[in-house]
Image: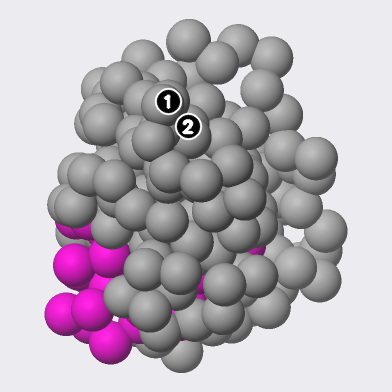
Amino acid sequence: MSNISTVLTQKGWALPVLATLSQGGIAGVYPLAKALKTSPISIEAALAHLVELKFAETNPGHGHPLRPEFVLTPLGEMMGPKASEILKYGETLGILSLLRKRWVLPIVAALDNTKTFGGLRQSLSPVTDRALSLSLKDLTQARLVHRKVQGHQFPPTTLYMPTQNLKIIREPLSSGLINFILSTRAGLRPG
């Protein structure tokens, strides 16, 4: 489950672009940049990423070759509403910028129950210790993850547990849709 969320979040604006395309149909770089209040360069990178993942494609027969319009593929149409749902929860909780960070959604997807740092690192390979540590710190500060240190044993063990808010955000990621996408995208690995 975490592989697709890792791949989706390699570009910070991919999830918001996917959600916006799912709500509005066809869009170009500049209308998306204006709607999402970010730079066209970020939108271009996110769209190129979504095209590579086969979630979006240029609108065949429409638009100028230098200013193409984009539409969702059938796979993107299935994933778009889930992206919208995740972002809606993020907006409600005031953590939209946090959700655009590369390892946050993969951690959300992987943290289905209490796990140790090593257990998370193993399930999120190729995450680095630093990236995982910083993302867990951000999630803990946002009260999405509860951190508990068990000091009564040697060496001390740190446990990470999902909070109710994390479970709400995780719901769209835990649907059967993700398993379907993973099975159809066999061999897809983050770069």
29, 42: nearer the viewer: 29
Q: Residues within 10 Å of mark 2 (few under 14, many from 20)?
A: some
- Front of the two marks 2 and 1: 1
The magenta segment: 83-102
Residue 110 visible in the shown view: no
Residues at marks 2 and 1, CA–CA distance in whole angstroms:
8 Å
**Where is residue 169 drawn, in percent x and y?**
26, 59
Residue 50 visible in the shown view: yes
Residue identified by numbered label 1: 60
Residue identified by numbered label 2: 57
Q: Is residue 58 left or right of residue 6?
A: left
* Residue 92 is one of the magenta-drawn residues: yes
Amino acid, disc 2: Glu
* Residue 98 is one of the magenta-drawn residues: yes
What secondary structure is marked by label 1? loop
Q: Residues within 10 Å of mark 1 (few under 14, many from 20)?
A: few
Q: Is residue 97 left or right of residue 10?
A: left
Amino acid, disc 1: Pro
**Where is residue 143 drawn, in percent x and y?**
35, 83
Question: Residue shown at 31%/75% (left/top)?
Answer: 35
Q: Are marks 2 and 1 in contact (CB under 8 Å)?
A: yes
What secondary structure is marked by label 2? strand
**Where is residue 120 drawn, in percent x and y?**
62, 50
**Where is residue 178 drawn, in percent x and y?**
36, 28
Question: Residue shown at 23%/79% (left/top)?
Answer: 91
